[in-house]
Image (tube, helix red, strand yellow):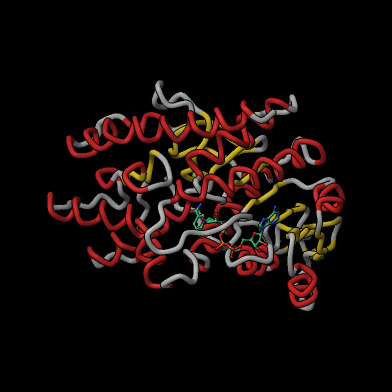
Amino acid sequence: WRAVKLRPRRRPWRRAGNRVVAQAGSYKVAILGAAGGIGQPLSLLVKMSPLVSALHLYDIANVDGVTADLGHCNTPAKVAGFTGKEELAGCLAGVDVVVIPAGVPRKPGMTRDDLFSINAGIVRELVEAVADYAPGALVHVISNPVNSTVPIAAEVLKQKGVYDPRKLFGVTTLDVVRANTFVAEMKGLPLADVDVPVVGGHAAATILPLLSKARPKTSFTDEEVEALTRRIQNAGTEVVEAKAGGGSATLSMAYAAARFLEASLRGLDGDGDVYECSYVQCQAVPELPFFACRVKLGMDGVEEVAAAELRGLTGYEARALEALKPQLKKSIDKGVAYAQQQP
Ligand code: NAI
């Protein structure tokens, strides 16, 4: 597997007859929750992508300032701001990818599931609009608890008759980014070379880094495996506590979401070699309808699920996988029940 970098592989030029001209980005991206802690730095990173021609920013507050500010950057993507439910149609019309970081973040002492009561409704409302105005778009859900908000999104899209499981993603890239960073630090490896698959879900013990499958091949003592696994699982809480009431991860999350978006756009663009971990509907673990694992991204979204990566696990990983199943199943069922109760 090749790690995906923020730098796009597309040539910055193309041939038109005898001439060489600049390659223009051609994808439209909408960010819902664009004025928030994640939304703002994510919007900046997306504005810098040569693959993006239009960037639509939506939020219920403060979006005009962010739009004006970002619009002054001399990169090609055209920025437009939208606010209020009645502007969602304009925001979503014709977009290729919708990224959703709208919702409340954790404060110290909170679990991701504590956010369910507020964020479930926000995700539901926004995905309803996606179904109405951008039914063919890829949807990247960042809002927590991802383990439940993605099943909610799936149910909403089903209710609207436009669900395509290949196009719905829970963004778990931050878990991979953290795993890569912590492993590189511990083992003194060059950061750019490290690639650790992280499977399961995106909350506490449901986050399972497969250290035995890390690239480059690296050996860990049992103590190192335990310490790294715990740190990767608790890394979000590390940031929440350091921010002491100021929110959760925003900058590293924006970086991770931009990396996942870039990978998706490269897939749409026909690059045949794009792999990322993501929380998707799949049969990798039969009793869990949604599961994070490495997927191949193509022109219609998920092209292949690398379920084979779940074979040949160490005893530690196999036990952790068994242990996470009930918790993840409960979160999935909670999301599905919520969406089905309130059609
Ligand atoms: P924030 O509070 O700074 O920003 C959230 C933004 O959403 C605000 O600008 C708010 O006005 C907007 N918003 C609220 N309701 C909305 C609606 N109905 N429509 C449109 N926009 C709406 O929060 P932050 O730090 O940006 O976090 C956002 C979400 O991302 C949280 O749920 C957080 O838990 C989650 N998160 C997910 C991670 C992941 O790995 N998937 C990592 C870190 C955070």
Q: Is residue 247 left or right of residue 100?
A: left
Q: Residue placed at 65% from the left, 51% from the top? A: 99
Please give the count of numbered marks on the rendered protein. Answer: 0
Q: Residue placed at 76% from the left, 67% from the top? A: 63
Using the image, determine if residue 111 lies above or below residue 246.
Answer: above
Q: Residue placed at 62% from the left, 27% from the top? A: 341
Report the front residue among 229 and 333. 333
In this view, which residue lies farthest toward the top?
286
Q: Where is residue 153? Give x, y as percent.
A: 62, 36
Q: Residue placed at 48% from the left, 32% from the top? A: 332
The image quadrant where one finds ligand 1 is bottom right
Report the front residue among 212 and 131. 131
In which quadrant will I find the C terminus?
A: top right
Q: Where is residue 225? Give x, y as percent.
A: 19, 51
Q: Where is residue 282? Give x, y as percent.
A: 49, 27
In which quadrant will I find the N terminus?
A: top left
| Residue 81 position by quadrant | bottom right
Report the front residue among 333 and 174. 333
Q: Is residue 76 left or right of residue 288?
A: right
Using the image, determine if residue 313 lies above or below residue 192.
Answer: above
| Residue 193 position by quadrant | bottom left
Q: Is residue 87 left or right of residue 182?
A: right
Q: Where is residue 229? Give x, y as percent.
A: 26, 51
Report the front residue among 28 and 339. 339
Q: Is residue 309 left or right of residue 164?
A: left
